[in-house]
Image (cartoon, coloured by chain):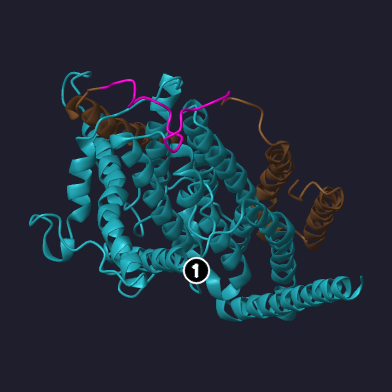
Chain colours: A cyan, B brown
């Protein structure tokens, strides 16, 4: 960094920023090494196995460093590019997938102030924009492999991710609307009552949509190991496969962290005012909770068919997302008219509206279910 | 004061480094002993047949079209949601009309049968 001679002030500031950016980019990577271990342990237990126990003798207690051993192993595996593949695109895809997965963390606030690379005034929009870059890397990987499994996987992945982006954005607009800001820092500061209390339906939609975005079971069609080998990254080996695996887990963690920020109050918690660093602990604890719910989904759910997944999105989540957004907007406008402006009364008013709406949705669904049932019965009775 | 987007750019560069570094490292340390059998396209042990880069199932395209329409709509809703605190009630009602029109669009696609798997 000797471009500008003399130690003028901008350079240390710039270096500091660079170091900060590096540290922030390391946060998801380091966390994920342990979360992969934790996931494998939990999945193992759910399937009546022990999960990883030791890798030789070097993996530490409870095989805590199993992922490091796997990382080193995968580093020494050959990188195979299949015949007929589109080489530049084939190599660019795993690079892009990791880059995009980490890039979201630029706006993630780990604490009140300073514990963030940059507090963009369009932070929430940035998160959406970055996560919608992921399908590019998938279609690049699937198409350039020149493999039929990979191609089917890429088609499935892209159609699923772009579809679920719509309910995700609609649900994300609820906290944005209540805060009046897209900055994640402002959204957290506005949550003296976590938004999951005020808009539980939007939180549920957001959770389901982000589970589908990151491809967790029951939405795990892009990989579907028992049908199409590994989906869009079938042909990848060595560290290029590792990149996709890593990016998948980072996306999971990111989805959990963003959910914690939008609906669980982010870094808010006791004693954060005195010790700002504590904010990171609260945020990561909340994210860990959400991550584990995703994990239990993974362990407990069967895989749906692609038409079921897309139908669930277009015929249920999208209309519901639109209705919830409008209900939140309307009720939030009407509440001041009856004198409910303080955080708690306002949240409870919105909660009531959400509950009424939720009950209505359950009512409509069960009515439709009964009607479908009657139709089946009638068809069986008729010759 | 550094411009916020400069910092985003910086972070993107750092992220790119983290994307490239492991693959570069793996390319340096990994063995390179290719043979024709290894580089075959993997199709569960069978030799591949026919063309792979084909036009595939138009259903995915229909979902893509629907996505474009609705994503543009979402982009229009962002500024509305952002200004919600300052908006009068009638602006919210306008959004109701806007979304109702889109809902009609969804209904049209639904009735047309484009959401069914063909």
Position of residue A197 measured from the top left corner of the image (x, y, whole percent): 55, 76
Q: Please, is residue A312 above or below residue A354 in the view?
A: above
Viewer-closest of A19 and A241: A241
Classify the position of the C terminus of chain A by image quarter: bottom right
* Residue at figure coordinates x 58%, y 23% from the top left: B51
Q: Which residues are magenta?
A: B34-51
Q: Is residue A227 above or below residue A203?
A: above
Q: Quadrant of residue A172?
A: bottom right
Total numbered labels placed on residues in the image: 1
Residue nearest the viewer, comparing A381 with A145: A381
Mark 1 lies on a secondary structure that is loop
Instruction: Specify whether A190 is left or right of B21.
Output: right
Magenta region includes residue B50: yes
Residue at figure coordinates x 70%, y 51% from the top left: B80
Picture coordinates of residue B67, whole percent (x, y): 69, 43
Q: Based on the displayed image, in which of its 4 quarters is residue A366 positioned?
A: bottom right
Q: Residue at x 54, y 71 (%)?
A: A196
Q: Nearer the viewer, residue B15 or A221?
A: A221
Q: Is residue A118 visible?
A: no
Q: Nearer the viewer, residue A96 or A2?
A: A96
Image position of A58 (left or right of A96)? left
Quadrant showing the N terminus of chain A: top left
| Residue A367 located within the stretch drawn in magenta | no
Q: Main secondary structure of the magenta part?
A: loop
Vertical side of B5 occupied by A314: above or below = below
Q: Which residue is mark 1?
A: A191
Question: Few, some or many C-alpha atoms within 10 Å of disc 1 (few <14, some 14-19, many ≥20)?
Answer: many
Residue A371 image position (x, y, % from top left): 84, 74
Residue A244 % position (x, y)? 38, 41
Is residue A208 among the parts visible in the rendering? yes
The residue marked by circle 1 belongs to what chain? Answer: A
Which residue is situated farthest in the right direction here?
Answer: A382
């Amino acid at each position: 960094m000797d471009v500008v001679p003399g130690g003028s002030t901008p350079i240390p500031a710039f270096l500091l920023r660079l170091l900060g950016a590096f540290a922030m980019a390391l946060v998801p990577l380091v966390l994920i090494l342990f979360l992969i271990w934790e996931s494998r342990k939990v999945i193992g237990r759910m399937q009546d196995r022990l999960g990883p126990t030791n890798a030789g003798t070097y993996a530490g207690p409870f095989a805590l460093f199993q992922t490091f051993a796997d990382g080193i192993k995968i580093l020494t595996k050959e990188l195979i590019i299949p015949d007929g593949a589109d080489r530049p695109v084939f190599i660019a895809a795993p690079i892009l997938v990791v880059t995009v997965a980490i890039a979201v963390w630029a706006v993630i606030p780990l604490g009140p102030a300073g514990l963030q690379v940059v507090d963009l005034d369009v932070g929430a929009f940035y998160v959406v924009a970055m996560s919608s870059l992921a399908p590019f890397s998938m279609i690049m990987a699937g198409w350039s492999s020149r493999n039929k499994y990979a191609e089917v996987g890429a088609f499935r992945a892209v159609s699923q991710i772009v579809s679920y982006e719509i309910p995700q954005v609609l649900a994300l607009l609820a906290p944005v609307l209540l805060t009046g800001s897209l900055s994640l820092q402002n959204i957290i500061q506005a949550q003296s009552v976590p938004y999951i209390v005020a808009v539980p339906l939007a939180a549920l939609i957001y959770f389901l949509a982000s589970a589908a975005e990151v491809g967790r079971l029951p939405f795990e069609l892009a990989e579907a190991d028992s049908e199409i080998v590994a989906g869009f990254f079938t042909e990848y080996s060595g560290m290029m496969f590792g990149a996709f695996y890593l990016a998948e887990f980072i996306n999971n963690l990111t989805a959990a962290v963003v959910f914690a920020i939008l609906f669980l109050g982010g870094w808010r918690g006791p004693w954060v005012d005195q010790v700002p660093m504590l904010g990171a602990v609260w945020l990561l604890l909340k994210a860990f909770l959400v991550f584990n719910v995703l994990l239990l989904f993974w362990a407990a759910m069967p895989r749906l068919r692609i038409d079921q997944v897309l139908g669930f999105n277009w015929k249920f989540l999208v209309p519901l997302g639109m209705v919830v957004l409008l209900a939140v907007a309307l009720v939030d406008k009407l509440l001041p008219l009856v004198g409910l402006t303080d955080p708690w009364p306002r949240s409870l008013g919105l909660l009531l509206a959400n509950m009424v709406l939720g009950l209505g949705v359950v009512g409509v669904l069960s009515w439709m279910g009964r009607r479908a049932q009657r139709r089946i019965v009638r068809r069986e009775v008729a010759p | 004061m550094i411009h916020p987007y400069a910092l985003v750019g910086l972070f993107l560069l750092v992220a790119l480094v983290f994307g490239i570094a492991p693959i570069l490292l793996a390319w340096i340390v990994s063995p390179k002993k290719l043979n024709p059998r290894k580089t075959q396209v993997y199709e569960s042990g069978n030799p591949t047949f026919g063309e792979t880069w084909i036009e595939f199932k138009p259903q995915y395209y229909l979902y893509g079209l629907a996505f474009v329409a609705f994503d543009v709509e979402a982009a229009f809703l962002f500024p509305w949601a952002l200004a919600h605190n300052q908006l009068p009630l009638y602006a919210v009602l306008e959004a109701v009309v806007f979304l109702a029109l889109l809902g009609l669009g969804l209904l049209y696609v639904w009735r047309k049968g484009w959401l069914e798997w063909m």
